[in-house]
Every structure is written in structure tokens, then in C-alpha cells.
Image (tube, helix red, strand yellow):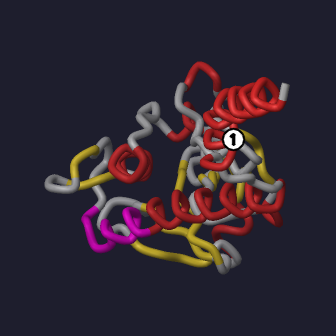
Amino acid sequence: MFLRRLTLTLVAALALAPLAAHTAERPVVTATQAQRSALEEYASTAEQLVDEALSYLGIRYRRGGTSPETGLDCSGLVLNVFRNAIGLDLPRTAREMANLGDKVSRQELKPGDLVFFNTMRRTFSHVGIYLGDGKFVHAPSTGGKVRVESIATRYWAQRFNGARRLVDDDATTDFMPSLSAMR
């Protein structure tokens, strides 16, 4: 009887060993850790966008321009930054970009958000990328070069049309992969 009990105990232990080992290998992730991870990934993506945008400083403006070698317009700058930083292809014009992602208020702006302005007596005629601390980068106009400006200056404050967030900052950590999923 003793041998039988010992055998059953050994068989049970051996049967449960892989389950215990598998459970031991899988780390327990708390909600706080998951949130921290999501925030870290969002910060990393935003940092990539900001770094890429700043790498275009000084490139000359060219209406319709989509190449840093020959010049960029505002939407050409934005589409290059998003493509090269995070692999997201955006539509060509500021107006089309204004239909993507989630609306955010001026008070909720985060680095990497798109900021839109009415510079040609029509909404969403100009776009830039918010950098943080009230600054944005953009390709201004003929004769200008890609530069950083304050969103609070009178000119830009009066023409501000809104902002859109294309990088998801919720608990999920992926940036929005398809334009058809964007609003």
C-alpha cells in the first residue's frame, strides 16, 4: 500500500512539473506595470517623431515638395517624419491628414500630435508637428525653411484649427496601423 501511494504521488508530481515550470517562466504583470510599459512605448514613439522632425530643420520650403533634397511643404514634412520615424504612411495634404486619428484640444497636446492652422483663409490649410512646451515644427512658406515656432504667438494662436493624435496613448501600445481605421 505504501509503495502504491508513493508511486501515485510521484506520478502526480511528474505530471504537474511541466505546468509548474511553465507557470514559473511566465512573469506576472500588474496593471500598473502594463500602464507604465504603455506609457514608455508612447514616450518612445513620440520621441522618435520629435527627433525625426528636428532632423529636417533648415530644409527649404517648396510648394508641393515631398523630398528633403529638393524642398518640403508642410504636409510633405509631416508625411516624411511619420514614414521615417514610425513607418506610418499619411495622405498627401494637410486637409486629408486632419481627418485621421483622434481630435485633441490645445490643452491636451502631446509631442507627436499634428497641429493644424488656417493660413490660407480655409481650415486645415497648414500642418505641423507638436514638440511639447508650446512649440511645433513646420515648413512655413515660400522663402522659408523648416523651423520651430511657438504655438502661442499671436499669428499661430489666431489661426489654430485643432489637433489630431495619430499615436495611440491608451493601454494598447501600437500606433494606429491602418488609415482606414482612423477617424
143, above or below 178, in the image: below
* Foreground of the two, 143 or 170: 170
**Residue 43, horizontal then vertical, whole percent:** 60, 65
- Tell me, yes or no, if residue 164 can be seen here: no
Tell me the magenta residue range: 51-60
* Crowd rating for badge 1 (residues with CA inside 10 Å; few <14, some 14–19, many 20+): few
**Residue 85, horizontal then vertical, whole percent:** 38, 53
Q: Residue at x 37, y 43 (%)?
A: 83
136, above or below 120, in the image: below
Location of the N terminus by quadrant is: top right
**Residue 7, horizontal then vertical, whole percent:** 72, 28
Residue 32 counted in the magenta span: no
* Foreground of the two, 110 or 18: 18
In the visual, does 182 lie left or right of 49? Answer: right
Location of the C terminus by quadrant is: top right
Report the residue marked by disc 1.
Answer: 20
* Foreground of the two, 3 or 79: 3
Q: Residue at x 59, y 19 (%)?
A: 180
Magenta region's main secondary structure? loop
Q: Residue at x 40, y 64 (%)?
A: 53
- Tell me, yes or no, if residue 102 can be seen here: yes
